[in-house]
Amino acid sequence: MIDVLAVIQARMGSTRLPRKVLRPVNGRPLLWYLVQRVRSARGIDGVVVATTVEPADDEIEDFCRLADIPCFRGSEGDVLDRYYQAALAFPCRWIVRIPGDCPLIDPAVIERVVRAAVENTADYTSNTNPPTYPDGMDVEAFTFDALSRAWKEAAFKYQREHVTSFMTEHPEAFRCENVPCDEDLSSFRLTVDAPEDFAVVERIIQDLGARGRLFGLGDIISYVRSHPDIRALNAARARNENYNIDDK
């Protein structure tokens, strides 16, 4: 058993931007960049990509095999079950949830959330409630016990689709903590959910990656602030557009 397992959920079936996780930048897919950045975070003992059993996601499993990245396949719609089964397959005490549409995630941000989670021994720790980091820097950390309870008790469809909804909606049962950013950067959009998002991230990787070192959140914000034309490309998109709780 390891202490901290990072689980990256990824699939090919995005409606707004199909195949986005394997879209190439400089000859490498976005998922490759994401995995490398997560692996660079101190305090992460293992990384696994959790995809679905759908045939379309065979490509993700193939990529992971060739890139020597552990891969787990589970339910497409019941993402909570996918996480739970992945944690059983890769036993751990803590799970760190990283969305597959965050290829610019800063290892230092992951480290900060993980450190807070372990030191505070909270059931659930994130930097998203409320959000002060840019969209695309989302990190959640929770114990296996919290995941197990949510898996057993979450009943609504949206609670099965959105892994941590049950935890955050029941503060009487789960001790939840938030890690705020030193500056409110929540208006910046660094996620990849639509073509215009990909255009922004592609430019950032091409330009900052050319410096030959692992760039962080500070580098990204400075770059975007100095290139208002790039920031404007996806400025009109709302945060968490795909979060729908109509099935509550």
Image (cartoon, helix red, strand yellow):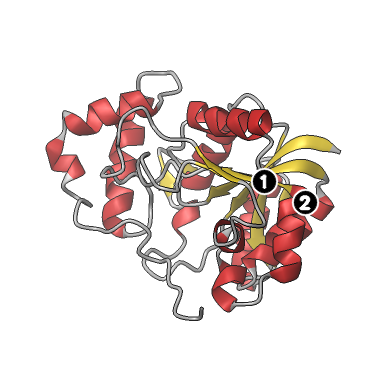
The mark that comes first in sequence, 2 or 1, is: 1
Q: Which mark is residue 123?
A: 1
> Residue 196 occupies which quadrant of the picture?
bottom left
The residue furthest top is: 212
- Outermost residue, bottom side: 247
On screen, residue 30 versus residue 206, left or right, reads right
> Residue drawn 49% across and 31% down?
109
User: In the figure, is residue 113 to the left or right of 93?
Assistant: left
176 lies left or right of 201:
right
Single out the residue that lies furthest toward the front: 172
Q: Position of residue 66 (x, y in %)?
A: 68, 45
149 is higher (above) or lower (below) than 93? below
User: Looking at the picture, does residue 85 appear above or below residue 98?
Assistant: below
How far apart marks 2 and 1 lie (CA) works out to 8 Å
In contact (CB < 8 Å): disc 2 and disc 1: yes
**Left or right: 106, with 224 as reference point:** right
Task: Provide residue 229's location: percent of width, then percent of height.
Answer: 13, 41
Q: Is residue 72 visible?
A: no
- Label 1 packing within 10 angstroms: few (<14), some (14-19), many (20+): many
Q: Residue 145 — which label?
A: 2
* Circle 2: residue type: Asp
- Would residue 4 be visible to someone looking at this image? yes
Placement of 71 over or under 159, stated as above or below:
above
Residue closest to the eye, 131 or 222? 131
Identify the residue at horizontal 42%, vertical 38% (top origin).
104
Q: Where does the image place residue 170, in percent across and percent down from the top left?
A: 60, 61
Report the front residue among 49 and 41: 41
Residue at (24%, 28%) from the top-left corner? 223
Q: Looking at the image, which residue sits at the far right?
A: 1
